[in-house]
Amino acid sequence: MQKTRKIRVLIAKPGLDSHDRGAKVVARALRDAGMEVIYTGLRQTPEQIAETALQEDVDVIGLSILSGAHKTLFPRIMHLLKEKNLADVMVFAGGIIPKEDMSKMKRLGIKEIFGPGTPTETIIRYVLDNLPQRS
Amino acid sequence: MRKTEEIVKGVLGGNRRSIARAITIIENNEPEAQELTARIYPRTGKAHIIGLTGAGGAGKSTLIEKMVREYRRRGKTVGIVAVDPTSPFTGGAFLGDRIRMQELCTDDGVFIRSMATRNYLGGIAKATKDAVRVLDAAGKDMVIVETVGAGQSEVEIIKVAQTIVVVHAPGLGDEIQAIKAGLMEIADVFVVNKADRENADKAVTDIQANLQLNSKESPWKTPVLKTAALTGKGVPELIDKIEEHRCFLKGHPECKTASLRTKAESELIEAIREFVTLSLIEEMKKEGKFDELVHEIMEKKTDPASAAEKLVKKDLRSVKT
């Protein structure tokens, strides 16, 4: 029987910002590129995001944040993912993340940051080219 | 296979990562899928499987969230499989049912999995049955399956669930819509949600009247309940009714057996169909007969049905199993 793998992506909005237009645009673009996108809505805690990633067995997580709280929330999220044995999941981020914080976020394990104005094609291409081999 | 053993052990122990991985393996038809399913199958049958169906916008996800809270209050563990449609054009899906259930996410006694139909018809995904089995084997007391929510043609759920709850909301269209073939016939419990709206009572009486007209003679009389999922009103009564149905099935083994029989038959037929079809077609393609006939069909020298008959009658004897 044929194998039919689909790429599963979690698009999550950690923290208290209520701007989800960007997240939804990315979610729709990934869906149109043939992926299964789980969107969990606003105001997600790091615990909810990590647990959702576990239950949904996602390949990729996209974090969208515009509140400036990334330096508090992202380390917590990455720590929880590691704790749950999900360190091999690809994590990328978007929203308002200042250039001077980007290298710090990447050191936490966030593979790429796509700021405002990034063409959705770029994100799709990145996911397809860098898809992790899950164990 | 060591990997499969580990995962099965994990599932039976209720390990969430194993549950998640098992569902993925089966959904993607990975090499270990068949062995996994075979090893899990004998350990199923304890959970009560509830199917929740009804048109989009009726409030299924919101209702499920309240139902799960009530089950948790009563000390039960719950697995949820929420199905959403795959785009026939892009192959992708937007799985958004979790949005309404996310507060349950970090409760240890709840496991939520979103599934895309991957173009399977009837309101659920092909792998939904097996995802339910994984959750059953993992020890969940109840497993709730939320179907796609497109409406009348969503009756595949009867092959998966023991109690079917059909959710309707007033104002979604003519009440006549609700009585069309399909949903009316499969409901074990009918729910009119958004009961705070003004035509809720009329919806209830309309549906009750139509249920009475149902010619099918069954000892179980489908009740029509009212709920307001946003506030949780009517949910404890719904849970009680579902429990009543479960006891009814237990006390009427002939109903339960009939239903188990239907499920077993249809699953066996589907499995046979898949094995035979795929191996037959593989054989035919190897011999070149398949392409020959495709050309004949394109040139209108023969029609698809006649071509299939020719191929199948000739090759059925030589099918490798």
Image: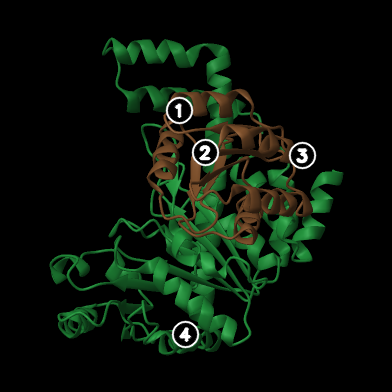
Chain colours: A brown, B green
Q: Nearer the viewer, mark 2 or mark 3?
A: 2
Under tag 2, what secondary structure?
A: strand
- Viewer-side residue, B230 vs B213: B230
Circles 2, 3 touching at the beta carbon (< 8 Å) = no
Q: Disc 1 to disc 3, how far (Cα)?
A: 31 Å
What residue is shown with label 3?
A: A135
Q: Amino acid at mark 4?
A: Ile
Q: Disc 2 to disc 3, how far (Cα)?
A: 26 Å
- Viewer-side residue, B52 vs A102: A102
| Residue A2 appears anywhere in the view | no
> In the image, residue A91 lies at what x, y percent?
63, 39
Q: Disc 1 to disc 2, how far (Cα)?
A: 9 Å
Can you tell which quarter of the image residue A92 is in?
Answer: top right
What residue is shown with label 2?
A: A94
Quick check: A59 left or right of B239?
A: right
Q: Earlier in the sequence, mark 2 or mark 3?
A: 2
- Mark 1, Cα crowd under 10 Å, few <14 / some 14-19 / many 20+, is few
| Residue A74 appears anywhere in the view | yes
Which labelled disc corresponds to residue B239? Answer: 4
- Viewer-side residue, B50 vs B17: B17
Q: Nearer the viewer, mark 3 or mark 4?
A: 3
Q: Amino acid at mark 2?
A: Gly
